Image (cartoon, helix red, strand yellow):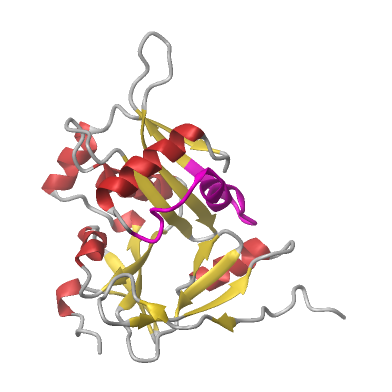
């Protein structure tokens, strides 16, 4: 008898400069997601800290550093803070649509503005239209682009102010990449709103978690992920709730 699916083969990248912590090197272990069991494999790997990029699942594998920590929000127990409640109220008029994973020029132009303002010179800053299309459309799993638009005016579709490439796992939503209008004076906190919307969407769908990827200790760019409580981190013995201030600094 044949096994339901072949055990995946894993590979390791060569060391490269770490994009988060100066002076350090990063290395990743990865495997390909393909075939009829790609979604099940992605679910299983997601529970042990892997992330998806197109048809590849990867996670850090740095011999001398453990700063990258997989984190997820417990959706059913989430209680917004006073500031987060204001952000939810400020953006409650946005029209939210789960779209099929198909790239549009409107999305790409918003991404370009976001990267230029928030991540100039970053690893994604050189993306062109084809690169963006590959990021969105090359998916072997259940994926959507969640669009956030301003209210319709005269029946016309509202302006796109945010988007998130999102995978649905058996136990939650995995936010692959989100971006938004970085200069919208009337809607500060759009990035936080997108995360909270995913938490509420997961709760409504009966999904227990929202996976936020990696929280990088010592990186100010990743500090926002710990504002959503309760939050769990992946340890050697499984997922545990934690207070970020209590986590030892990485070696």
The residue furthest left is 82
In the rendered view, tell whether residue 108 sits above or below residue 27.
Answer: above
The residue lying toward the viewer, choosing from 99 and 232, is 99
Q: Residue at x 53, y 45 (%)?
A: 144
Quadrant showing the C terminus: bottom left
Quadrant showing the N terminus: bottom right
Task: Please state if 136 lies on the left or on the right of 222 as rendered.
Answer: right
Residue 119, quarter of the rendered image: bottom left
Percent of width and height locating residue 9 = 66, 81
Percent of width and height locating residue 159 = 36, 25
Task: Please state if 158 lies on the left or on the right of 133 as rendered.
Answer: left
In the rendered view, tell whether residue 157 sits above or below residue 80.
Answer: above
Report if residue 172 lies within the magenta region.
no
Q: Residue at x 29, y 26 (%)?
A: 93
The magenta stretch spans which residues? 122-145
Task: Please state if 11 lies on the left or on the right of 246 as rendered.
Answer: right
Residue 48 in sight from this viewpoint? no
Report if residue 134 lies within the magenta region.
yes
Percent of width and height locating residue 32 = 64, 70
Q: Residue at x 44, y 81 (%)?
A: 27
Residue 31 in sight from this viewpoint? yes
Count of residue discs: 0
């Amino acid at each position: 008898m044949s096994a339901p699916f072949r055990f995946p083969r894993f590979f390791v990248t060569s060391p490269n400069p770490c994009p988060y912590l100066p002076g350090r090197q990063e290395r990743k272990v990865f495997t390909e997601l393909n075939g009829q069991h790609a979604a099940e494999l992605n679910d299983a790997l997601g529970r042990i800290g892997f992330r998806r990029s197109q048809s590849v699942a990867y996670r850090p594998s740095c011999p001398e550093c453990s700063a990258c920590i997989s984190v997820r929000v417990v959706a059913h127990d989430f209680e917004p803070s006073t500031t987060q409640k204001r952000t939810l109220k400020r953006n409650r008029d946005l029209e939210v649509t789960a779209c099929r994973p198909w790239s549009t020029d409107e999305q790409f132009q918003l991404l370009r503005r976001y990267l230029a303002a928030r991540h100039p010179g970053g690893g994604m800053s050189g993306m062109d239209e084809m690169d963006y299309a590959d990021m969105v459309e090359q998916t072997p799993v259940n994926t959507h682009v969640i669009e956030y638009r301003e209210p319709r005016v005269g029946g016309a579709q509202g302006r796109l102010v945010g988007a998130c490439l999102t995978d649905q796992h058996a136990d939650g939503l995995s936010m692959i990449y989100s971006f938004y209008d970085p200069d919208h004076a009337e809607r500060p906190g759009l990035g936080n709103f997108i995360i909270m919307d995913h938490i509420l969407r997961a709760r409504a769908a009966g999904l227990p978690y929202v996976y936020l990827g990696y929280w990088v200790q010592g990186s100010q760019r990743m500090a926002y992920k710990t504002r959503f409580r309760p939050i769990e981190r992946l340890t050697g013995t499984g997922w545990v709730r934690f207070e970020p201030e209590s986590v030892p600094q990485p070696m």
